[in-house]
Amino acid sequence: MMQSSLRRSSIRCLMTKRSMVIGSQNSFEGMADTILKTSSRVDSATIVPKEKGIQVNWLDGRAIIFNGTWLRVNCSSNIHFSGQKIKFSGDFLDATPSEVSVSDDSRSISVHWTDGHASEFESKWLRLYDNSASSMITRTQGSWPTALRSWEAIPTVSFSKFMDSDEGVYELLRNVNNSGICVLKGCGDELGSVKSIAKRISPTSHTMLYGDMFNVITEEKPVNIAYTNERLRLHQDLVYYESPPGLQLLHCIKFGDDVEGGESLYMDIMEAALQFGKKFPDEFKVLTSIPATFQKNRNFAKDDIDPKKPAPMSPDGKSIDLEPMPKDGYGITANETATLACYMTYHRPHIQLDKDDDITAVFWAPMFEGVLYAPNKALRQYYKAYSKFQMFIESGEFASEYTLKRKMRVGECVVFNNRRMVHGREEIRGNGVRHLQGCYTNIDDSLSRYITLQNKQGKDDGQPSNVKRWGNGSIPFIVSHQT
């Protein structure tokens, strides 16, 4: 029963249906209510003086102790209407409850504090944010994505639906969330379209090295392996950034009938790391502990050329004459920005784990690795583990089962999660032209767009409705504020 001693002058702080998510990059509002299948009705609540907290006893028999400071920090009076904190956690270090009661309908508890403040918390909110070990495990179950197999089709969405409705954008991002990849069909072959497609999701990102759009086309004097006819082995793009791109988009502008090969390759690298760890635990541990060196270093660059000095030399000893990009996007240098001088380096292990040793990110880009800094003993361990992982994803049973191969068609645009999927290309043969235009979006912007669209759609169409691991170094914390 709600005690009558509650003063009218007390500030009542109700956790409403509106999300009050504070201090966690992993909290998402409006997810499917099925994530919470347990009772959220409260039977009783008592103060636990030793913990300076509240024990809540639920009708289903579960008992949870909530820390007093944690409760006071998350009181809705401490949240500005913009969603930002008004006071910080350090302001409530000594928060001590003096009185607690349960509402008549068992759907909320009221807490009075020794400083005279009063708070009210919805029982469902408390159950969702239960931070006991078992509940934290339950909340993240289902966040591991299901990898596509080599015999499975990559999901598709029509270009018109994507461009004309938020539902189309949501459908594409849901496919990326679930499978890591999706193909837009019917995009046409107009140059520059890929930027318009990307901006339906979020602003383009990572534009310094290759501009806001880049051309994947064979060049006479390439400054990137991708701009040749050579086979491109599986990798992620721009891992030398502290925060590599999230989504990568590649729009097929031309794919000549006389082009042989050139099929695109994709693989779920997070699934690869998971399976590798099960089969080779010692080598897996090495790849989670020894930092690799990822770098981008352009030694010859257009803006460094002095006409009075000899032309820069490529590694094979041939001189390089860098010319401006023709207006039609073709020619000797179809990526003018890619000739600018740069130096980027970043050190991190290939496989990133959280405190519970769960995989949260994988970084794999052999063609962009620099000098490894490690003692000799660590070097021997590293190269042994590296070689095994390389063979694991390039040949053998796993590679055969999980490598997706698809020949792009003119008018298609593939959208994939660069943090979760590695990509590559078979060797291009013949005399025809294969031309893709691409760009990137930021991982956080893209994920936010997906979550907000999911909330807006507000429907369960039989598809997985929770957020999967996007490879951004974080495990989704799925909650629902629906009643």
Image (spheres, rainbow, N blue to C red):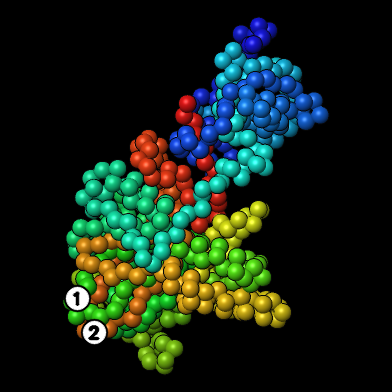
Residue wearing tag 1:
256
Q: Residue at x 62, y 70 (%)?
A: 280
Q: In which quadrant of the rendered view does residue 317 lie?
A: bottom left
* Left or right side of 105 for 435: left
Which comes sooner in the sequence, label 1 or label 2? 1
Disc 1 from disc 2: Cα separation: 9 Å
**Mark 2 sits on what residue?**
430
Q: Is residue 119 visible?
A: no
Amino acid type at circle 2 is Gly
- How far across and down, in percent of the image, does residue 140 sit? 56, 46
Q: Which residue is depicted at the point 70% across and 35% down? A: 90
Secondary structure category for the residue under label 2: loop
Q: Which of 175 and 368 lies nearest the eye of the viewer? A: 175
Residue 299 appears left or right of 459: right
| Nearer to us in this view, 391 or 452 | 391
- Which type of secondary structure does the marked residue at label 1 adopt? loop
Q: Position of residue 86 (x, y in %)?
A: 59, 30
How far across and down, in percent of the image, does residue 423 sit?
40, 69
Query: Residue 51 location in percent, x, y?
Result: 78, 31
Image quadrant containing the N terminus:
top right
Q: Are marks 1 and 2 in contact (CB under 8 Å)?
A: yes
Single out the residue that lies furthest toward the bottom.
317
Q: Is residue 244 left or right of residue 425?
A: right
207 sits left or right of 50 in the view: left
